Each structure stands twice: as C-alpha cells, then as structure tokens.
Image (cartoon, coloured by chain):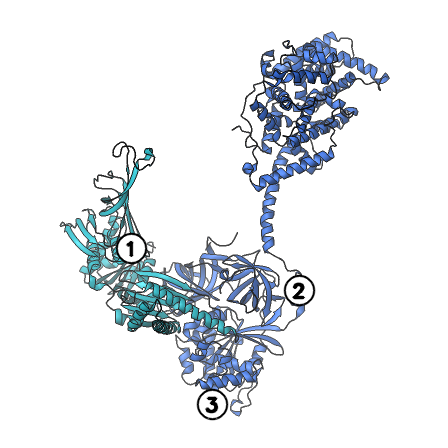
Chain colours: A cyan, B blue
C-alpha cells in the first residue's frame, strides 16, 4: 500500500489517500473501510442520457425512449453501506449512496466502487468513528514494505493436497488436489497403487507450478504426515531437472524451482487438510526461518494460549481465558499479558463495538501487555474466531473469572 | 378467453352440480301450476284423470290449460283403447306413450324427491316453448327453429324463463398443456380409441335414423334433432369423429329410452331415470354458456339450430332424412307454428329439407364465427363419454344421485389415476434401477443352512517396528498360504536391500515404498484358512503418521492382535504417552473390539525370558483393563515372528518350555465369532475402490456392517446417491453369490461410474439409505490431550476409511464415565480423561453416518487433532442432515 496523503484532525477525523499495490492491500482496505465512512475513488458508471436534454434524436439508433447510455469514468464519493471482499479473487466491492455532487450522478444514487490495484482511493472518517489506533496501525503495517513476506505452502497426504499462499495477513487456498488412490493389495495391484501415487504427485506439481512464483516466494513449505512430502519434493526436483534438460515450455519456471531449491522446507504435519497449516506454521523449523512474520507469530501465540489453557489450575488458577466478557474483566484488572483478538471484531458495523475493542487493545498496550490482532484469513485467526475471536493469556490467575457465567457463548 | 378455454372435465361437473341444485320449481311456477291444475280439474270433471296426471300434464304443457286438457283427454282415451288395440300403434300413440312416460318420469322424480334434471327440463321446455303463442312467422322467413333463437326473446315468456344469451367467446380447443405435449397427444389417442369402442358397441344405429329401430328416438324432438343434425357433419370432412361420437351417444340414449318405454314403468325405472339424469351434462358440453335453470332452454335452442345450420352450410350435403316425420303429438301445440303445422299437414322431411336449402337466407344469420363456435363446441369430449366411462369402471352400479356421485369420483379417480401414474413412473424408474437378482436368494436362510466356516477378521496393531507384518508374514508362511518360492524370492530381494529380516514382512508390505522404508504404511489385507476357520488378516501400520490407516483397518476387524516388541527399551518406547501401543489399544477398544490377543514378540531378543514376558504382561494388563478390556478377554502369548515360535507351531525350544499355552493360531481359532444382524438393511463401508483388470466393472472392497448382499442386487452408494448393481462378490478371494454382515468382501459393481465411489462411502439397501450428517451429537471419551478441547476446536473425524474435518460446535455436558450421567452442563473446555457429550459440525463434504443405536459399526467415530487422537466416541444423535443428502 502506498500512502499518498493524510489529513487528520486532533480527534482522528479526516481523510487518508491510499493506493493498493498488492492483493493483500485490498484486505487492509477491507479492514479499514467501515460503514458510514466516505470513500472516494475513480470508477465507471453507465450513464443514461435523457434524449430530451442532452442528445437530440436519441442517437446511435437506439430506441429513442431509453435515450442512450454510455460508460463514463468518473470519480465518485459514496457513503459506505456495505463492503464485500473476496480473498481468492482479490476483489473488494464497496457500495452505498453517492455522497458528493457529480455532474452525472445525482446525490443519493447507489453506486458500487470496485477498488482495484494501483488505483488510489480516499477514505474519510468522520469524528463519530475516527481513525483510531488500530486503524492507523493497519495503515502503517500495510505501508510497511519490509514486512512483506509471501510463502508458498503445500500440505498433503496421499490422495489429498492443498496448495496455499501465505502472506502476512492472508492464507489463500489456491488449489485442492484430490486423487483417488487405490490401496495396496496382493502383488499386481500394488502397481496400481504406485501408479496412482505418481499421478497424484504430478497433479500436485502441476498445481504448484501454476500458483507459485518461485522467484518471489520467500519460502516453500511442504508439509505432510509420513513420507509424502519427501516424495513430492523428490518428484519435483527430478521432473524439474528432466524438464530443464529437455527444454520444454515449463523449463523457465522449473529452472527457478531448481534455483530456489534451498527455499524448500519439509515439515511434518498430521494431515493434508488446510487447517494443518496452523500446525505447520508454528513448527520450529518454520519459526526459525520466518520468525519475523506475522503468521508465524500468530500461530505461535495461539499455541501458547492453548498450552497455558491446558496447564489448567496448575499455576494456582487458570491463566488463559476466552470470550469477550471474561477477557474484558481481565483487561479491567490489568492482568492481560497477551491479548489475542481477531480483526473480525474490528470490522463490526457498530461503531460502539469497534470502539470497545479498540479501547481494550489500547488499554492492554498501556498496561505493558501485548495485543496481537489476528488476521481472520489465517488458519490461526480462523481458529480464534471459532472461540469468540478474543482470548487472553494472563500474568496471574483471576479467581473471579471462574464464577462468571458463560452467557456470552 | 372464456372460462371454457381451459376446458377440462371437471368444469362440467361443477356446473352440473350447481344446476341440479337450482332446478326446483320457483314460487311463480308453483302458483301457475296450482291455477292451471284447478282449471284443468274443472274441465275434466267426471273423467278418471288423477290429480297427478293433471299436474304432470300441466307441467308438461307449461301451464297451458287447453293443451293439458287435450293431452289428458287423449291419454284417457288411449288408455281405454290400449287393451283392445295394442298392436295398432300409430306414430301419435307412440308419441303419446312417450309423453306418458315423460309424465311418469316427472311424477316418479317428484315422488322420489328428485329434482328435475336437464333431460326432463329440456324436453319440457322445448315443448312448452313451442306451445307458447308465438308470432306467426311465414315459413320462408327464417321461421325455422334455429332462427327463432335470435328473435325468440320477445315471445312473452315469463322473465324467469328468458334466456340471456351471452357470448362467452369461442371456446378454443385447447389440449392439455397447450396441446403440444405428449400427454395431450396421449389423451387424444385415448379419446379416439374410446370413441372407436363406442362405435363398435353401438352399431351405427343413430346414423341410420330411418331404420325401424329408432322411430321412438325420433319422436323425441330434442334428441331426434340432435341426432339428425349430428349425422350431417359426419359426412363433412371436419368433425367426423365428433359427430360419430355424438351419434353413438345419442343412439345409446335413445335405445335406453326405448327399452324403458317398451317396458312398463318398472321398479328399475328409477335407476334408469338416474341414469338418464347422468346424461344431463350433455347440455353444458354443447354450450359455452353457464346454463342455469332459466338459461337451460336458451342454451339448448341456441345450440341446436346452429349446429343444425352448421351442417347445413355444407351445400353438398344430401338432404337429411327426418327419420320419423314429426307427428302431431310429438310436437304438441305446434299448430300455431307454420313450419310444424305444415309438417303436420303431411309435408315430408324431404320437402322440408328442400325448403330449407332453397332459402339461402336460412344460414345467413349464422355467422362464420358462430359456425366456428358451434363446431368448437363439439370439439370437446362429451361428458357423457366421461360419465359412461366412470359408470363402466364402477361396474355400472350407480346409486342414488348417480350423476352427482359419479362426478367427484370421476374427479377423484382421474386424479388418483394421475397420481398412481406418476408414482408408477417413479417406481418404474426405481424398479428399473433396482434390478432384482434373477433368483432371489434368501441369504439369511442360506447363511444358516450353509454352515460355512467361521470367518474371523482380526486386526494386527502395535507400535511401529513391533514386528506386526513379520509376524503375520510368518503365520501365512507357516500355514502354507505363501509358497516357499515366493518367500525365497523375498529373502533374496530383502538381502539385496540390506534388510534381510524384512522378508516375511514383504508378504504383506507390497508397495515399493513400504519395502524401501521397511515400514507398513497402509493396512494390508490377507486371508487364509485353517482347518476350522477362515481368517482375514488386517495388518495395520504402526507408525504414528498412519494411525488413520490403522483406524480404517481396525474398523474392519472383530478382534485385535496387539503385537508388543519385548526387546529392551522397545516395549517402553511404545508404551509412553505418545507411543502407539497405548493409542492403538485404546482405538481398537473404542472401535468396538472387545477381545484382544497380546503377542509378546521378539522374545528371541531377550533370550526367551519369562521374567520379561511377565513384566510386559503385568504392565499391559493393568493398562488394558483400564482401557476397558476385561481380563478374561485378554490373552498373552510369548512368540517370535522371526523365529516362528508359538505362532502356528508350538515352540519346541527348551528356553520356552515355561509356556504351555496356545499358539497364536490356536488362540485365533478359538475366537467365537460375533453375532451380527444379517437380516438388517444392507450397510457396507467401502475401504477401497479400483478398476478391475479385465472387466469394465468397478471393484470395491469393504466390510459389510449390517445386512446381507447378493449378486444381482441393486445397491445405493452414499453420499453420491448413485445406484449400482452387484455383479459379483468375493469373500477372501473366493467367489460367492452372497455375503453377510461381518464379511470383508470384494464386490464388482456395474452401472455406476467410478467418480461416484470413494473409499469411505457406504453402500446400502435402496430401501433405507444412510443419512449424511451435517451436525450431530456424540458421547466421547477424551484421550490424552496436549491442549484442551474447547468450543470451536478443529478436529478430524475418522470412521473407517472416511475422514472429514469438523469442529466442535458445543460442549453440551460432562458425563460420568461409569454411570453415563451428566455431571456438568456446558463445560468451558474438556481435558484428558473426561467423558462428555459434544456437538460436532462436519465442515467438508458429506459424511454418511448412523447413530450408534442404529449401527454399532457406523456409529463409532474417532476424533483426532494434529496427529493425536483426542477422543473417541459414539454418535448419539444426528442433528441435521446435509441438504444434498439423499434421503428422499
């Protein structure tokens, strides 16, 4: 993301002009844009010209009753009502009524802005829902070029593979490969099994080739139970070498593959399902290499939370809690060491709710605790979302929390 | 569009029902009737005319006193003459009799409390209308009946009798569903067929109106007119079939009438009357007008002449033969009207015809549109047809109010017919799918009578490298299931790879990778027979990464052989928290295995030490009993897979003399098979799907969990919901025509594509498909956990070959392990060793599932998380089912 201009007053009201550079920037934009904000961006709109006013005779041979319509590029400002983000397609649609006078569109007419890469937009927040610390942090991290890391990850088990791209803030499932593999049976049919296995690896390799740009990826993680990963890597390198030798059409990308051989990491995981990624990203070998990345940090923190939770009463009381009510109580008592919060909670359309969580984050930080905003597009964030989206690791146990009811569930 | 454009049978009936109820004498009629009756009485004083007769006559002549008197006198006179001159039947007397009959009809109707129906009404009104004083119209000037319709209104009829002729638009002939569909074509074909049948039944009586059989028909003006006119279009090209049908209908009706009239008015008359009553809807079929009492006559008169005229439009038509020239008595009171008068004066039908055809203006008033309209009126199927059909189907017995009764029945039956047709369609479809075996075998009986060898399926489990595969390879070799040559080859190859000790394991570890790595990765299935028992071995992998495969194997076994490496430290390594000895034992127990044989293997490594054996035994016994295996169901055997001691043959080794128990094979032979419900609906869980070498059939292997299956049967694959036919069945590589629950079988399926089958799917009986759960509740026992289970935890559900991602929706309650009672509602998390009721949501695709109650096999699940078995349990209740599920 490129920060083009920033005009904020003391309360945080004002506008920021940003230009998304990468698909993940749209995710940031999605987290920034809230209902009630004013978003101004260049867009296209089909303008119907009334024949009586602008174009005598209707023109272009179209039926004169409907006048003529033209697709016009114009800059519109809308009051945001709805946002819609598709992480796989990398598309962000924002819709709402037009908020500023325009020569073509009357005020209040509905329009959907499609935010696109390399096209700047201006986001204005009013004083009732100003730019708060979390939003500004999002802008800062989005504009921090250094924190960009993209990792390719393949989790597989015989017959099933998930090809994913993991960026700082997003895990994108690119392709799921499923190949039926017959079981080994007496003598002859073991051949069928081996054949199917080879077919499976070639399908996975083809999918990787399609989705991974080895030149850009910081690392490629291959994770599997058993020996599938090992075999896949072997298969990849063998076929790539063969390919380069024969000079086929894929030789270019295979050359890159061989070049980036050292970027490959073999990790053990329990299954080939996507959520095994969570386990993969906190594996020691991954952490050693990608410790500075957000997703690794998130996975590790979540893991820590669980381990504290499983300790249970051992340390004189439970030191890990989840649920908005319990965590809020813990924050009030200044007991929070690490706050785990999902960005989903900040996306609430209710200004009050967002303010409440922003305040919680600020409070934890002011108390010297750590507040980690999980991306709900990562496996760890998804898991956090499943138990209310907010959790905390405490410095000391708070017995009162045990008595609290569970009605927030 | 008129309301008739969407014409169907039901419309008639509704209308008729209405009319039937409307046809009561109006108060005005009553008054008129009373007046007329008194007058007639006065005139006829001294005669034998009864009150009823007078009433009828008055009614017949529509309250015309003079005519009634005349009629009654005639009648009385005829009654006198009757006996003396029975043979001498003039047309007049015949008509008279008709009249009398008619009068009786009405009387009878009144007596029985029936209202007049259309037949009577039409007749009487037809008669009365002509008896009314009408303006004198010269014959030449559209004096014919048909034309009089158009100027008939000001004749001074009582207002109640005035006809409002409303043009409701031309009822276009619309086929069902627009007429273009197959259904419409079918209906048409049926109509034609029906009509042909009628023609056969009625040998064209009506078409030869002059034939001696029909004079009485013709003497009824209404029907005779209809009859005659209907003959005409039959000669034109258009509407041939319609007119034929009409003709046949009318002929039948008149025949009926004749029959009755020839009989004295008998007790059957009532039923006859009802039957004639059932014809009443005919009027509405000819008329687009919603006829009620007041319009009935108008309807009739409108249609009658116009259809007549329609046919007349055809110049080429030969003159119609008025079969029986209208006699004076058949047109009572026509003396006022010229045309009839002339007829009376001896004008023949031919003369009339000439008269008519010579007057071009005759058909002028009948416009093209009307012609069309009239033609179209006859395009519709006659309700008589329908009713007759209904009567026929009812066996001709129609009770009181037959016409009324027939209607709903007709309606109902047609709907029911449709429904059954629809049903039969789908049933047919299913039936087509469900090809039954040529010779249905009663598998249950066969199973009982066959007394086949006991089948024992056992799964071999244990920590990695405990020697499971080697032990089983040894066993297969020792019982002679593997020939010497093969073993020698394996030994040679294994030695070449530097893994000489793996030779026996290679019997089961067939895949290249397994041999290279020396690790079993997937369950290997093998079978052999001893003298007493047929065995199926399921050799499970011991490596922790392949626990899912082990679960698949364990779910196919009835018994378990737990192999323990007794080498120093090896047993301990397998018995730690994360070791597979414990996990496997717990898993097989939670998968329903109760009997376990512990093979303490590799005793050669500890010099056949009894002490080591006892040490292992004690440690394990404590654990196994805690895991739920009773001591009596647990056996320990010291053995060595590599050396072959105590596997098939008792050890002769002096070091092992301390052991006097059974060998492993003996112990296995002593296992008593588990009783299974072989009569239940089929459930077979698929463990593998592969294409056959030679045939196009798709082979699936799996375990029959419940019920039975036989060759030729059609089964349903869930979740794809595709049917397939069983082509062949093999149990332990032996072809068989049938298989029962508990068997591990290989089945060849035809009529299904391989994409519809996956390992983990269920084949089931078509009649009772398995449900695919979306959410369900389960009772689980929590295993050793690394992290606690909380709401929202991701888990993988395993059952047999099926794996599906799921998450915990809710932790419903903690339960007491012993009693199963709820100890705490809504716990916040579950920790190791707890028992709980949880609700789970299946995230991925369909998961065919049954409750534990319904199926012991399919109701057991294992929950794993990040490669660790976190819980195992049974499905308590299926809370919601996948939409796409298959349960119709």
- Residue that badge 3 annotates: B607
In the figure, is residue B386 to the left or right of B6? right
Task: Give yes or no for contact between labels 1 and 3 (Cβ–Cβ under 8 Å).
Answer: no
Residue at point 25%, 69% (across, down): A291
Q: Are marks 2 and 3 in one subunit?
A: yes
Query: Between residues B612 and B409, which one lies in front from this camera angle?
Result: B409
> Where does residue B80 sit, x and y in percent of width and height?
82, 14
Task: Give yes or no for contact between labels 1 and 2 (Cβ–Cβ under 8 Å).
Answer: no
Residue at point 66%, 60% (across, down): B438
- Residue that badge 1 annotates: A344
Mark 1 crowdedness (10 Å alpha carbons): few <14, some 14-19, many ≥20: some
Q: Is residue A275 visible?
A: no
Between the residue at mark 1 and the residue at mark 3, the CA separation in whole angstroms equals 64 Å
Q: Secondary structure at mark 3?
A: loop
> Where does residue B116 sit, x and y in percent of width and height?
66, 22
Q: Are marks 1 and 2 in one subunit?
A: no
User: For the view shown, which residue lies furthest in the front direction?
Assistant: B316
Which circle's residue, 2 or 3, is located before the other in the chain? 2
Query: Between residues B18 and A266, which one lies in front from this camera angle?
Result: A266
In the figure, is residue B222 to the left or right of B423? right
Q: Chain of mark 2?
A: B
- Residue that badge 2 annotates: B445
Q: Are marks 1 and 3 in one subunit?
A: no
Whether A130 is drawn above or below B228: the answer is: below
Q: Which mark is residue B859?
A: none
Whether A156 is drawn above or below B503: the answer is: above
Whether A123 is drawn above or below A156: the answer is: above
Between the residue at mark 2 and the residue at mark 3, the CA separation in whole angstroms equals 52 Å
Q: Chain of mark 1?
A: A
> Where does residue A321 sit, x and y in percent of width and height?
29, 61
Mark 2 crowdedness (10 Å alpha carbons): few <14, some 14-19, many ≥20: few
Between the residue at mark 1 and the residue at mark 2, the CA separation in whole angstroms equals 62 Å
């Amino acid at each position: 993301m490129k920060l083009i201009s920033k005009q904020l007053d003391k309360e945080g009201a004002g506008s920021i002009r940003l230009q998304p550079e990468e698909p993940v920037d749209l995710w940031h934009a999605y987290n920034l844009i809230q209902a009630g904000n004013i978003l101004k961006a260049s867009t296209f709109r089909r303008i119907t010209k009334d024949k009586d006013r602008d174009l005598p005779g209707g023109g272009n041979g179209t039926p004169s009753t409907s006048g003529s319509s033209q697709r016009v590029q114009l800059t519109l400002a809308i009051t945001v009502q709805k946002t819609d983000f598709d992480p796989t397609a990398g598309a962000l649609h924002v819709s709402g009524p037009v908020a500023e006078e325009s020569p073509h569109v009357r005020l209040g007419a509905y329009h959907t802005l499609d935010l696109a890469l390399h096209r700047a937009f201006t986001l204005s927040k009013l004083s009732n829902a100003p730019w708060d610390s979390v939003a500004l942090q999002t802008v800062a991290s989005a504009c921090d070029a250094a924190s960009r890391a993209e990792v390719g990850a393949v989790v597989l088990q015989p017959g099933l593979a998930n090809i994913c791209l993991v960026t700082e803030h997003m895990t994108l499932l690119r392709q799921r490969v499923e190949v039926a593999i017959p079981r080994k049976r007496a003598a002859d049919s073991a051949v069928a099994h081996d054949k199917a296995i080879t077919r499976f690896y070639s399908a996975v390799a083809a999918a990787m080739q399609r989705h991974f740009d080895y030149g850009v990826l910081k690392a490629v993680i291959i994770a599997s139970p058993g020996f599938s990963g090992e075999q896949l890597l072997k298969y990849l390198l063998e076929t790539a070498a063969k390919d380069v030798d024969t000079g086929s059409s894929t030789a270019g990308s295979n050359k890159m593959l061989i070049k980036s051989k050292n970027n490959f990491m073999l990790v053990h995981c329990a299954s080939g399902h996507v959520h095994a990624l969570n386990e993969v990203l906190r594996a020691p070998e991954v952490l050693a290499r990608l410790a500075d990345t957000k997703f690794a940090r998130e996975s590790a923190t979540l893991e820590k939370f669980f381990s504290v939770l499983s300790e249970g009463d051992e340390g004189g009381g439970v030191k890990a809690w989840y649920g908005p009510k319990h965590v809020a109580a813990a924050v009030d008592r200044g007991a929070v060491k690490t706050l785990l919060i999902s960005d989903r909670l900040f996306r609430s359309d209710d200004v009050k709710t967002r303010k409440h969580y922003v305040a919680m984050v600020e409070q934890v930080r002011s108390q010297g605790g750590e507040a980690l905003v999980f991306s709900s597009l990562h496996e760890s964030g998804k898991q956090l979302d499943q138990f209310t989206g907010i959790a905390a690791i405490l410095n000391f146990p708070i017995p009162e929390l045990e008595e609290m009811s569970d009605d927030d569930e | 569009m008129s309301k008739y454009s969407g014409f169907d049978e039901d419309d008639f009936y509704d209308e008729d029902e209405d009319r039937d109820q409307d046809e009561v004498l109006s108060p005005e009629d009553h008054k008129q009737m009373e007046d007329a009756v008194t007058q007639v009485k006065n005139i006829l004083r001294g005669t034998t005319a009864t009150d009823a007769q007078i009433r009828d006559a008055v009614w017949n002549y529509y309250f015309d006193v003079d005519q009634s008197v005349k009629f009654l006198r005639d009648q009385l006179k005829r009654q006198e003459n009757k006996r003396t001159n029975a043979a001498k039947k003039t047309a007049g007397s015949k008509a008279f009799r008709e009249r009398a009959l008619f009068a009786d009809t009405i009387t009878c109707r009144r007596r029985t409390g029936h209202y007049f129906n259309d037949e009577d009404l039409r007749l009487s009104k037809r008669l009365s209308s002509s008896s009314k004083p009408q303006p004198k119209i010269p014959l030449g000037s559209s004096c014919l009946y048909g034309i009089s319709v158009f100027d008939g209104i000001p004749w001074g009829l009582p207002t109640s009798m005035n006809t409002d002729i409303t043009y409701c638009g031309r009822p276009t002939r619309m086929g069902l569903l627009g007429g273009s569909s197959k259904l419409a074509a079918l209906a048409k074909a049926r109509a034609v067929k029906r009509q042909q049948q009628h023609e056969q039944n009625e040998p064209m009586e009506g078409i030869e109106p002059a034939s001696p059989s029909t004079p009485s028909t013709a003497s009824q003006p209404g029907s005779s007119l209809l009859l005659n006119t209907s003959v005409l279009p039959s000669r034109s090209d258009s509407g041939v079939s319609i007119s034929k049908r009409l003709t046949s209908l009318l002929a039948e009706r008149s025949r009926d009438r004749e029959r009755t009239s020839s009989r004295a008015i008998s007790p059957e008359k009532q039923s006859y009357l009802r039957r004639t009553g059932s014809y009443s809807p005919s009027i509405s079929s000819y008329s687009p007008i919603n006829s009620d009492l007041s319009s009935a006559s108008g309807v009739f008169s409108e249609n009658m002449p116009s259809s007549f005229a329609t046919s007349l439009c055809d110049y080429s038509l030969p003159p119609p033969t008025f079969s029986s020239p209208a006699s004076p008595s058949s047109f009572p009171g026509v003396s006022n009207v010229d045309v009839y008068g002339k007829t009376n004066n001896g004008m023949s039908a031919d003369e009339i015809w000439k008269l008519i055809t010579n007057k071009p203006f005759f058909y002028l008033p009948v416009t093209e549109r009307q012609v069309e309209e009239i033609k179209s009126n006859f395009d519709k199927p006659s309700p008589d047809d329908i009713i007759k059909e209904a009567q026929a189907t009812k066996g001709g017995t129609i009770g009181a109010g037959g016409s009324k009764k027939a209607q709903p029945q007709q309606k109902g039956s047609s709907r029911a017919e449709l429904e059954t047709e629809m049903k039969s369609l789908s049933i047919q479809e299913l039936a087509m799918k469900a090809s039954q075996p040529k010779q249905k075998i009663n598998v249950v009986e066969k199973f009982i009578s066959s007394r086949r060898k006991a089948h024992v399926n056992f799964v071999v489990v244990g920590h990695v490298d405990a020697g499971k595969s080697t032990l089983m390879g040894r066993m297969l070799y020792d019982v002679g299931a593997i020939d010497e040559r093969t073993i020698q080859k394996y030994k040679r190859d294994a030695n070449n790879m530097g893994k000489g000790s793996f030779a026996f394991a290679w019997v089961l570890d067939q895949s290249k990778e397994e041999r290279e790595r020396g690790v079993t990765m997937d369950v290997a299935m093998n079978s052999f027979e001893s003298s007493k028992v047929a065995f199926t071995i399921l050799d499970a992998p011991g490596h922790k990464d392949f626990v899912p495969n082990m679960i698949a194997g364990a779910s196919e076994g009835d018994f378990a052989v737990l192999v323990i490496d007794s080498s120093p430290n090896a047993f301990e390594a397998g018995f730690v928290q994360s070791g597979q000895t414990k996990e496997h034992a717990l898993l097989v127990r939670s998968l329903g295995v109760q009997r376990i044989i512990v093979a303490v293997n590799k005793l050669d490594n500890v010099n056949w030490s009894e002490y080591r054996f006892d040490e292992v035994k004690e440690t394990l016994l404590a654990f196994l009993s805690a895991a739920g295996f009773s001591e009596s169901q647990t056996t320990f055997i010291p053995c060595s897979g590599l050396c072959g001691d105590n596997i098939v043959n008792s050890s002769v080794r002096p070091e092992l003399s301390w052991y006097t128990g059974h060998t492993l094979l003996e112990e296995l032979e002593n296992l008593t098979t588990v009783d299974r419900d072989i009569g239940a609906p089929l459930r077979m869980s698929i463990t593998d799907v592969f294409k056959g070498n030679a045939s196009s059939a798709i082979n699936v292997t799996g375990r029959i969990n419940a019920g039975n299956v036989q060759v030729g049967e059609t089964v349903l694959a869930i979740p794809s919901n595709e049917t397939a036919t069983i082509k062949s069945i093999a149990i332990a590589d032996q072809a068989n025509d049938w298989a029962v629950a508990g068997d591990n079988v290989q089945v060849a399926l035809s009529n299904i594509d391989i994409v519809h089958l996956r390992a983990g799917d269920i084949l089931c009986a078509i009649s009772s498909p398995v449900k695919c759960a979306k959410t369900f509740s389960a009772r689980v026992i929590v295993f050793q956990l690394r992290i606690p289970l909380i709401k929202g935890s991701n888990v993988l559900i395993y059952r047999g070959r099926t794996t599906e991602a799921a998450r915990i929706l809710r932790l419903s309650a903690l339960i007491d392990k012993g009693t199963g009672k709820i100890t705490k509602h809504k716990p916040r998390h579950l920790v190791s060793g707890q028992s709980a009721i949880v609700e789970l949501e299946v995230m991925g695709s369909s998961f065919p599932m049954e409750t534990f109650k319904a199926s012991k096999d399919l109701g057991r699940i294992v929950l794993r998380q990040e490669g660790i078995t976190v819980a195992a349990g049974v499905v308590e209740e299926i809370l919601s089912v996948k939409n796409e599920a298959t349960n119709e």
